[in-house]
Amino acid sequence: MSSKRLWGGRFKGSLDPRIDRLNRSFDFDRRLFFVDIGGSHAWAAALQRAGLLTKKELRAIAGGLGRIMGEFSQDTFKPLPTDEDIHTAVERRLIELVGEPGKKLHTGRSRNDQVATDLHLWLRLRCEQLRRDIAVLALTLAGAAERAGEIAIPAYTHLQRAQPVLLAHHLLAYVEMLDRDGTRFLVAARAADEMPLGCGAAVGTGFPIDRKALAKDLGFKRVARNSLDAVGSRDAALDFLHACNVLAIHLSRLGEEIILWASAEFGFVRLSDTIATGSSLLPQKRNPDGAELARGKAGRVLGNLVTLATALKGLPLAYNKDLQEDKEAVFDADDTVTGILAAMTATLEGLEFDEKRCAAALKGGHLLATEIADYLVRKGVPFRTAHEKAGTLVARAEKEGVDVAELSPAVMAEEVEEIGPDITRALSIKAALKAKRALGGTAPNRVRAEIRRRQSKPAAPTPPRKRRPKS
């Protein structure tokens, strides 16, 4: 085995171990092995098309790369201290296996365009998988909404009771957020669908590489058209981290709702034994750890976005070592949101709804005050006047220590002359829900239709057709 660094021709002596430790990225970027080896397969084929490799050399390189892929897949690859990163490790091992042909693989290629290409390949795959995971959680939410049936709870504004809403409608609000999250990952995947390979260290390659054919081999839709931009930018990684950040925020909000609902103060849901945790001291506790960690880890994902944005903001073109900071930020964000998605899917599957506690929460808080204003509008009263008149009834109810819906029609008529005995038909939770039948509202028929629509959608987006590099 060779311990010589692949860039050491002009250097004498050993790299200071303190610099070496900071410089080394193999411990975290090794997860790129499958895309790095795939990219090298395609690059070798491009070199052969350009007359820089013979077919025999290409076969030797392909065989060596296949063996290295097996070593990584089976966790038998043995790195050396001189393997700074996954890219140098693969090339070093290839030379060990096939000799001189392996030394030709890096012809016309820099680690700068190689790293950017590997990251783009990896980002496309992870965006696709995360979109599938998001779709699974969305379907799980739709299933929870179906289980909730026509259970109603208060809708809150300013965390104060506002109007009745179906619990199912509330759950489906998060499905809408997840839909947008999926779109953001699609945008990130499109940003990564541009191939930097063939741009060299900064100014392009000096060999007749057919970059369009190379892009086709690797499944890229576009070829980067400016070498400086291709190796010195990380827009796709920023887009990915932004998508991860917004997704984490949405999952944090959902986690917070579940934490509140599972508390004794709300009691809308009960955590099943499969998703609740206990206390080492308090025997009665059923803790929503999954939801709490979803809330807590959102800050970690935001930190990763800030890390990369800060690293990029002052960089001159083209490549700078600062760009190595993209990997840990991207990988950690990916690991974190993948874990949160799985945990929240399990949490939603294990929720049990307490219909009695939900019904009890609908009593008090003057939830039907707006229904009085709407009733008056239907009687021809201008809304602003109707709003004021409804407010006087709330004041009367508070004076008498009751909910506004508990006032008799006669008492209401004392305050508001337009009110008649038919007010009672408007002042029920069922009537209030049914009235919200415009598209997007909480009327039961609207919500049932939305659940059916959601459940008829595929559980995951159709993966794109994969191309294999020619060899």
Image (cartoon, rainbow, N blue to C red):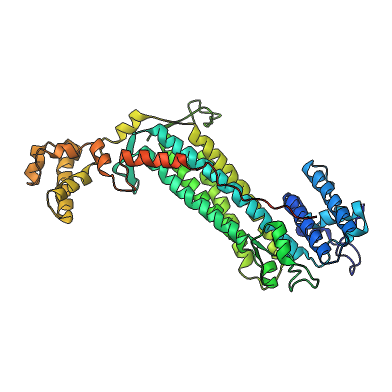
Give coordinates of residue 315: x percent, y percent: 65, 70
Image quadrant where residue 112 sits? bottom right
Residue displayed at 79% across by 62% down: 46
In this rendering, position of residue 375 left or right of residue 44: left
Give coordinates of residue 76: x percent, y percent: 83, 42
Residue displayed at 38% across by 38% down: 168
Q: Nearer the viewer, residue 149 or 260?
A: 149
User: In the figure, 66 relative to 18: above or below?
Assistant: above
Image quadrant where residue 150 sits? top left
Give coordinates of residue 92: x percent, y percent: 86, 55
Q: Is residue 215 visible?
A: yes
Q: Nearer the viewer, residue 266 or 101?
A: 101
* Figure disc tally: 0
Residue displayed at 76% across by 69% down: 201
Q: Nearer the viewer, residue 68 or 2?
A: 68
Q: Is residue 401 visible?
A: no
User: In the figure, 45 relative to 404: above or below?
Assistant: below
In this rendering, position of residue 28 left or right of residue 351: right
In this rendering, position of residue 456 left or right of residue 169: right
Is the C terminus in the top left, top right, bottom left or bottom right quadrant? bottom right
Give coordinates of residue 125: x percent, y percent: 64, 51
Give the farthest residue toward the top.
283
